[in-house]
Structure formats: C-alpha cells, structure tokens
Amino acid sequence: MEPDSTRPVLCTHCNGENLVGKRAMSVFCRHCRKRLILEDYRINTYHSVRLFATCGDIYVDRTGQVISPIRVRNLTVQGKVKGDVEARGRVEVTGTGELRGDITAPLIRVEEGGRIEGFCRIGALPDNWLRAAFPVK
Ligand SMILES: [Zn+2]
C-alpha cells in the first residue's frame, strides 16, 4: 500500500498502532487480533451499549443520548452522554451538552453552558494517541 493511502489508528482494545486504508470501515488489530471499527457515528436517538468503541469520531446530536462507556478518537457532545470517556483526540461539550462520567483525553473543550460531571485527565497521555488523532498531513 502507498503511504498516501493509509493513516494510523490506535486499537480501542490494546492501544496498539495500526496503519489502515483511508477508506477502510473495519480492520483486525495486528497486535491483539480484535476487530476495530473505523467509522464515524452521528447519534440523534437513544443509544445504550456495553461499550461504544470506534477509531473514528462520535458526534452526539442535541437529541442524542448515549448511555455507555466510550472509546473514540474525537467526541462532540451536543446532547447527553453517561459513561466514562477515553478519547485519543479531542472531547468537546457544547453549550447544550451534558457529559456524566470520567474523561481521559489530550484535549477537552467545554463551551459556556456545557456540563461535565466527573474526573478529567487531560494531556500528558501517550504520544501515539495524538499522532493517531491528528496525523501530520
Ligand atoms: Zn489491539
């Protein structure tokens, strides 16, 4: 595969780095062999699962409600989230957003009016988290 057609993603199970095709939707981790979801999600209804994990981004609309631990690249919360969040990139809570759970992420942004209830661990995280979330163009 040409370098241009791949991007680095981090395994949502073992944090191992994988190079995947730009258009791939899922792939098996070369470290732990588990299946990785690479898709982005937009949630505008009630969504409750045991673990919501993707190497892509999750966008929770104003009408969306997620009750689940989340492992993700970037998370935007306009609606409600209840569950611990582990993001490789950015967590953003807008003025209408409500996040109840502990957050671990290199970057967190909360707009005026947005609510967070839980512990936050920001920055000083493994280098490969940022590399996968914000690949150098
Ligand atoms: Zn893995």
Image: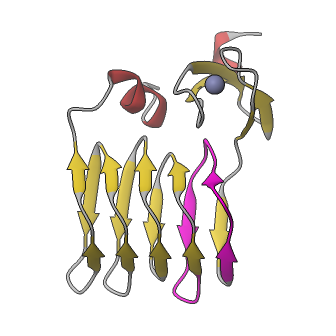
Q: Residue at x 43, y 60 (%)?
A: 84
Comparing 115 with 100, the one in front is 100
Q: Residue at x 64, y 11 (%)?
A: 3
State whether residue 40 is above or below residue 115: above
Q: Is residue 133 left or right of residue 96?
A: right
State whether residue 98 is above or below residue 30: below
Comparing 31 with 24, the one in front is 31
Where residue 27 sits in the image (x, y, percent)? 78, 30
Where residue 113 sits in the image (x, y, percent)? 23, 87
Q: Residue at x 29, y 42 (%)?
A: 106
In the figure, residue 123 lies in which quadrant? top left
Where residue 135 sits in the image (x, y, percent)? 46, 28
Identify the residue at the far top of this view.
2
Q: Residue at x 60, y 30 (%)?
A: 11
Residue range (magenta): 46-64
Comparing 103 with 74, the one in front is 103
Question: Is 52 colored magenta in this rendering?
Answer: yes
In the rendered picture of this protein, how many numbered marks are placed on residues? 0
In the figure, residue 129 lies in which quadrant? top left
Ligand 1 is found in the corner quadrant, namely: top right
Q: Is residue 45 left or right of residue 126?
A: right
In the figure, residue 88 lies in which quadrant? top left
